């Protein structure tokens, strides 16, 4: 039998289902493609989507789509073969949020039944999104800066124009407001600089072995005095916790943010618990030091868990309106934790919220390292 006939035979016997073909094309695509089943679990994740989101296929297969994105504007498919547009917010691996326009269609199996969905965004849309994200960022920053500036200008003008008419109490009050707002402005600028350094990858880290307990103890004293000892903050240390290999200034920055938030968002309670222990953590579990900061405050709803690690994400609740904050702290802390080779996670429910900071216990390089 001629060679080509044999080949034809094998082609005839080895037919691929349209789903298999679709899966291969989707996976190989440089565009952002995603397929998921009727149970909303991800069945295919393209290489292009790995580039856009930073997630690897192995981390996303089998996960519900809600782990990867939320739908901002829902679209309805009139029939399985229909193609429609959805506005979705993608959660990237480094904690950023990205709002994109995506196309959605149904996947029909060889029996003509709907077996799942295919969602895709084009790279062109993606670069437009980056531009949009940049201008959204500028507009949010301007808005955040304007509030304290307006307040400083307003109260300074009142002080100047009132001359002797204001009594001493009012004068003191207005000057205090100006000082507080100037401090808010300076915190905001510090946070923005930190974000810029993180994003432009110009952050210098000095990695060395660090004993965690003394650092936590110092932070507890600072936060307790900041909030007039409103909370009892306990620190428990498991025996034989190894040193962590981190940059101590960055570690302090992360822990201060976590303990400060724990007190700030739990005015109805009077305690915060911190536990330091050794755990196994990561995709390929490694020994790490975990610092758990638990508060018994307002908590965080499940749908908001991802949001809080993104820039300027202040959740809409009565406390956020009353408390000071830029919505940048957790974004910075999460990025720093990752940069240090660790992680930052959160669980909230049953009246308690726990942020867990994971830190490496060994360093490959030591000394000063540059992140690039
Ligand atoms: P902020 O400057 O607003 O405190 P963060 O980035 O530190 O900014 O936190 C982002 C948002 O996450 C906060 O505005 C708040 O809504 C929520 N959040 C942070 N920590 C807690 C907590 N321990 N309990 C409840 N909500 C929290």
Image: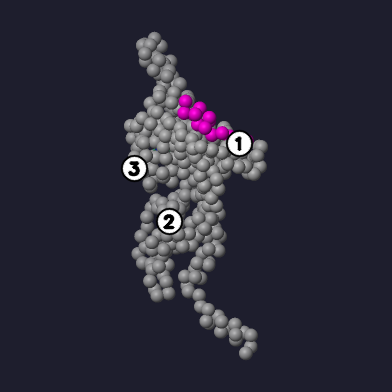
Position of residue 364 measured from the top left corner of the image (x, y, whole percent) = 64, 44
Position of residue 70 measured from the top left corner of the image (x, y, whole percent) = 41, 51
Question: Cα distance, mark 2 to mark 1?
Answer: 39 Å
Dot 1 falls on a residue whose secondary structure is strand
In magenta, the rendered stretch is 206-221
Mark 2, mark 3: which one is toward the viewer? Answer: 3
Badge 2 crowding class, 10 Å Cα cut-off, few under 14, some 14 to 19, many 20 or more, is: many
Badge 1 crowding class, 10 Å Cα cut-off, few under 14, some 14 to 19, many 20 or more, is: some
Dot 3 falls on a residue whose secondary structure is loop
User: Which mark identifies residue 65?
Assistant: 2
- Residue 295 on the magenta segment: no
Q: Which residue is mark 3?
A: 350
Extreme residue toward the top, this view: 164
Question: Cα distance, mark 2 to mark 3?
Answer: 25 Å
Position of residue 106 measured from the top left corner of the image (x, y, whole percent) = 41, 65
Q: Which residue is mark 1?
A: 209
């Amino acid at each position: 039998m001629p060679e080509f006939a044999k080949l034809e035979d094998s082609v005839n016997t080895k037919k691929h289902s349209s789903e298999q073909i679709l899966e291969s094309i989707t996976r190989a695509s440089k565009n952002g493609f995603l397929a998921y089943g009727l149970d909303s679990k991800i069945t295919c994740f393209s290489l292009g989507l790995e580039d856009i989101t930073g997630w690897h296929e192995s981390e996303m297969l089998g996960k519900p789509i809600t782990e990867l994105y939320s739908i901002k504007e829902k679209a309805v498919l009139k029939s399985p073969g229909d193609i429609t547009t959805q506005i979705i917010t993608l959660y990237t691996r480094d904690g950023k949020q990205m709002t994109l326009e995506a196309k959605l269609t149904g996947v029909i199996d060889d029996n003509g039944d709907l077996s799942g969905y295919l969602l895709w965004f084009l790279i062109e849309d993606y670069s437009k999104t980056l531009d949009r994200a940049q201008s959204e960022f500028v507009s949010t920053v301007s808005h955040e800066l304007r509030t304290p500036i307006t307040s400083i200008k307003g109260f300074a003008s009142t002080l100047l124009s009132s001359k002797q008419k204001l009594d001493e109490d009012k004068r003191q009050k207005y000057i205090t407001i100006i000082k507080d707002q100037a401090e808010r402005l300076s915190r905001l600028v510090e946070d923005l600089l930190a974000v810029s350094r993180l994003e432009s990858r110009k952050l210098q880290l000095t990695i060395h072995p660090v004993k965690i307990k003394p650092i936590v103890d110092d932070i507890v004293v600072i936060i307790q005095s900041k909030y007039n000892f409103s909370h009892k903050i306990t620190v428990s240390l498991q025996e034989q916790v190894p040193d962590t290999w981190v940059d101590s200034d960055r570690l302090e920055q992360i822990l201060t943010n976590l303990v400060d938030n724990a007190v700030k968002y739990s005015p109805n309670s009077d305690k915060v618990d911190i536990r330091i222990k050794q755990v196994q953590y990561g995709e390929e579990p490694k020994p790490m030091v975990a610092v758990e900061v638990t508060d018994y405050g307002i908590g965080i709803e499940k749908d908001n868990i991802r949001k809080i690690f993104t820039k300027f994400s202040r959740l809409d609740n009565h406390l956020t309106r009353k408390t000071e904050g830029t919505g940048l702290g957790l974004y910075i802390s999460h990025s720093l934790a990752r940069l240090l080779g660790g992680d930052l996670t959160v669980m909230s429910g049953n009246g308690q919220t726990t942020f867990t900071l994971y830190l490496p216990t060994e360093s490959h390089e030591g000394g000063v390292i540059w992140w690039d």
